Amino acid sequence: MFNSNFTCLLLAVLALLQGICALKEGECEVCVKTIEKFAATLSDKIKKDPKLIETEFKKFCKGSKNKENRLCYYLGGLEESATGILGELSKPLSWSMPADKICEKLKKKDAQICDLRYDKQIDLNNVDLKKLKVRDLKKILNDWDEVCDGCIEKTDFIKRIEELKPKYMGRSEL
């Protein structure tokens, strides 16, 4: 019915399409890491039931921050989520599908899921705090879950970070 040249061409096109759809290195980093982290919290009993997975994901999302919280919002894991595509997460997870493949499927439903990226971490050992923007100084404090009451000037933020460095970086890293 089909000749071998046509079959080879068809297989080549399918392989090419598979390569185009596959995630690139570093793509969907927040999605992949969050799903891996979430999957590691599941017991064997829960891993097999999509409804239980969805319930656990909503619990997981309540404690999420920053980019993970935004992913939870996109998937429908938060009460204030506008949409819900948790089934696209829970079913493949119940089949033991790898996180990167789940994110690949989720990307087809909502491309912004893969637009989430982690912020670059600031190397406090090698950075001159005076050269950072106030926004970056605030981010350091926020990452530590600290506040800077009464901080108005850039120097106030730098002073607070210097005070907290021993607590968060350990004496050996200073």
Image: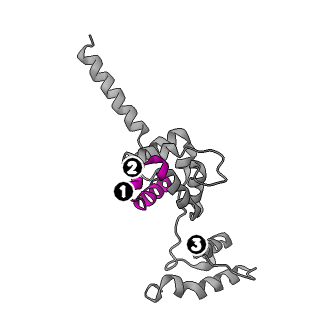
Specify the label residue 44 is tagged with: 1
Residue kind at label 2, given as amino acid type: Lys
Q: Alpha-carbon distance for marks 1 and 3?
A: 33 Å
Position of 149 with respect to 13 (left or right) is: right
Q: Looking at the picture, which amino acid does disc 1 mark?
A: Asp
Find disc 2 in the rendering and name its residue: 48
Q: Is residue 93 left or right of residue 115?
A: left
* Callout in the foreground (3, 2): 2
- Work out whether residue 49 or residue 39 is closer to the camera in this orientation and state it: 49
Most common secondary structure along the magenta stretch: helix
Q: Percent position (x, y) of residue 168?
A: 52, 82
What is the total number of numbered labels drawn onto the structure image? 3
CB within 8 Å, label 2 to label 1: yes
Residue 27 vs 171, above or below: the answer is above
Which mark sits nearer the N-terminus, 3 or 2?
2
Above or below residue 164? Residue 3 is: above
SS of the residue under disc 2: loop
Q: Secondary structure at mark 1?
A: helix
- Tell me residue 161's x, y (percent): 61, 82
Q: Quadrant of residue 20?
A: top left
Residue at 52% x, 68% y: name it: 121
Residue 83 position, x and y percent, is 63, 44
Q: Residues within 10 Å of mark 2 (few under 14, many from 20)?
A: some
Residue 135 in the image, given as x and y percentages of width and height: 66, 69
For badge 3, the amino acid type reads: Asp
**What segment carries the magenta color?**
28-53
User: Element under label 3?
Assistant: helix
Say whether residue 144 is left or right of residue 22: right
The N terminus lies in which quarter of the figure? top left
- Can residue 116 be seen by looking at this rendering? yes
Residue at 43% of width from left, 62% of height from top? 41
The residue identified by callout 3 is 143
